[in-house]
Image (cartoon, helix red, strand yellow):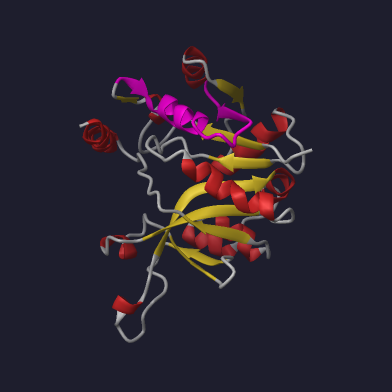
Amino acid sequence: MPTAIHAIIPARYQSSRFEGKPLALIDGKPMIQHVVERAQASAVLAQVVVATDDERIARVVEGFGGRWVMTRPQHKSGTDRLAEAAGLLGLAEEDVVVNIQGDQPLFAPEVVAEVAQPMLIEPDLPMATLMYKITRPEEITNPNHVKTVFDREGRALYFSRAGIPFCRDGDDGEATYYRHLGFYAYRKKFLDTFVRLPMGQWERLEKLEQLRALEYGYTIRVVLTSYDSVEVDTPADIRKVEGMLAQARA
């Protein structure tokens, strides 16, 4: 039986920086609807499901014809919510679960196939993620933009909020920097393993979950994409996204 690919979009209502973010209107449409519709435009997905902890989000998703599952509110991370949702959906051990962030309303549907492809080629690969070549120098030192370095086979060596690699001699014009994009593909059985692992020391310091997999010796395949993606972190970002949509229509 061919490996099925499922997209799950974790969406929680409570947020210290932006409460109710999934329901924020962008061009008159809730942000979570933008995300779901872009995911549904990917031809590789068997299904697209929102994993939420709030009835208000569930009602909105149901209202525009989307599918949802209700998960526990106590989860510390989106990955924990993802794992519970995958269990509730009864996914097979070898299925691929793509984690799509609910705050990226303009992502290109093509990235879903890009992040899932290594999982289809390498049946023993536990997870994969995306990276994007940095073109704006200010992103190199911005801790909100996570950088990654990788080996010659495209396996992640490290992720950091710092500007890696560090050019000792100061000639960083010779260096290429890659920003990590928050799209993940997991083998379902590894997702169950991952959420049972204790937090690692590098994850604790950097506040980056993917470092837990590396610290425990698991491979993360990083895929270079030509598609950037904008995250909505604050209400001010809504205006930025609406401006980009208007520009695309012009």
Q: Nearer the viewer, residue 209 or 15?
A: 209
Q: Nearer the viewer, residue 200 or 165?
A: 165
- Residue 51: x and y in percent read 57, 29
Picture quadrant where residue 125 is located = bottom right
Asked if residue 149 is among those painted magenta in the image, a careful observer would answer: no
Identify the residue shown where x is 53% and y is 48%: 114
Residue 235 vs residue 195: left or right?
A: left
- Residue 65: x and y in percent read 51, 15
- Residue 32: x and y in percent read 44, 27
Picture quadrant where residue 16 is located = top left
Asked if residue 29 is among those painted magenta in the image, a careful observer would answer: yes
The image shows residue 179, relative to residue 90, as above or below, that is below
Identify the residue shown where x is 24% and y is 38%: 240
Q: Nearer the viewer, residue 11 or 120?
A: 120
Query: Which region of the structure is painted magenta?
Result: 28-54
Q: Nearer the viewer, residue 203 or 113?
A: 113
Residue 114 vs residue 225: left or right?
A: right
The number of numbered discs placed on residues in the rendered structure image is: 0
Q: If the image is split into quadrants, where does the N terminus sit? A: top right
Identify the residue shown where x is 28% and y is 24%: 27
- Residue 91: x and y in percent read 73, 34
Does residue 76 appear anywhere in the picture? Answer: no
Farthest-out residue, right: 1
Does residue 101 appear anywhere in the picture? Answer: yes
